Amino acid sequence: MFFVYFSKKLYPLFISKTVGILFFIIILLFPMILENVNHHYAIFCVQLLLIIFGLRGTPSDPILIKHFPVFKRFTAVTFGYALSRAIMYVIIAFVLVYLTDWIGYYGIWIIGIPLTLLWIKAVFYYSALEKEFDNYPLANEWQVR
């Protein structure tokens, strides 16, 4: 949650894009890292990377929610969140276990890569919406406030 402090200087959607791209790189390296782990401290470091750069709530969440219709905002956001949790529980409990048995740690790619790419695509879509409605306060991505 330390990304909130960065949002004072960087636009929150830029932070979300950066986190998504870093997480995509981590997901690509994740199976190879797990195959070569020899010590429990290394597993702790991998878990720490996933916690820090995981796809979770970012400072851009209020910007994303703002684009939902006012009278359907609560229903759309909470239903989407609940549906995503229900699907993830089923996928992790039944699909991921068998994937890692069949093809090893590379089975994580079958779930991780599409989800990460969809998350990044959604952030870029909301960034385009912000620019379309002239709510994007910066001239370019790398500009610091």
Image (tube, rainbow, N blue to C red):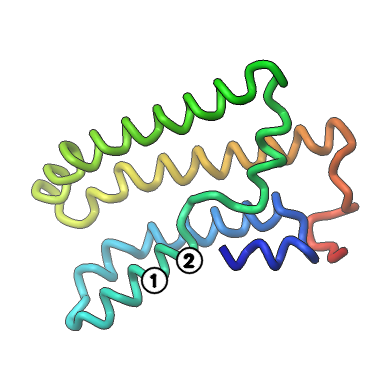
Residue at 85% x, 54% y: name it: 140
Percent x, y of residue 70: 72, 21
Q: Are marks 2 and 1 in contact (CB under 8 Å)?
A: yes
Determine whether, in the image, residue 71 is placed left or right of residue 31.
right
Q: Is residue 5 above or below residue 14?
A: below
Tell me which amino acid carries mark 2: Ile
Query: Can you tell which quarter of the image residue 115 is in?
Result: top left
Percent x, y of residue 113: 39, 46
Residue at 23% x, 48% y: name it: 107
Q: How many marks?
A: 2
Q: Residues within 10 Å of mark 2 (few under 14, many from 20)?
A: some
**Mark number, residue 48:** 1
Q: Identify the image quadrant of the N terminus.
A: bottom right
Percent x, y of residue 135: 86, 39
Q: Residues within 10 Å of mark 1 (few under 14, many from 20)?
A: few
Residue at 40% x, 63% y: name it: 50
Q: Which residue is mark 2?
A: 52
Tell me which amino acid carries mark 1: Leu
Q: Is residue 13 above or below residue 7?
A: above
Query: Can you tell which quarter of the image residue 8 is in?
Result: bottom right
Determine whether, in the image, residue 112 is placed left or right of residue 36.
right
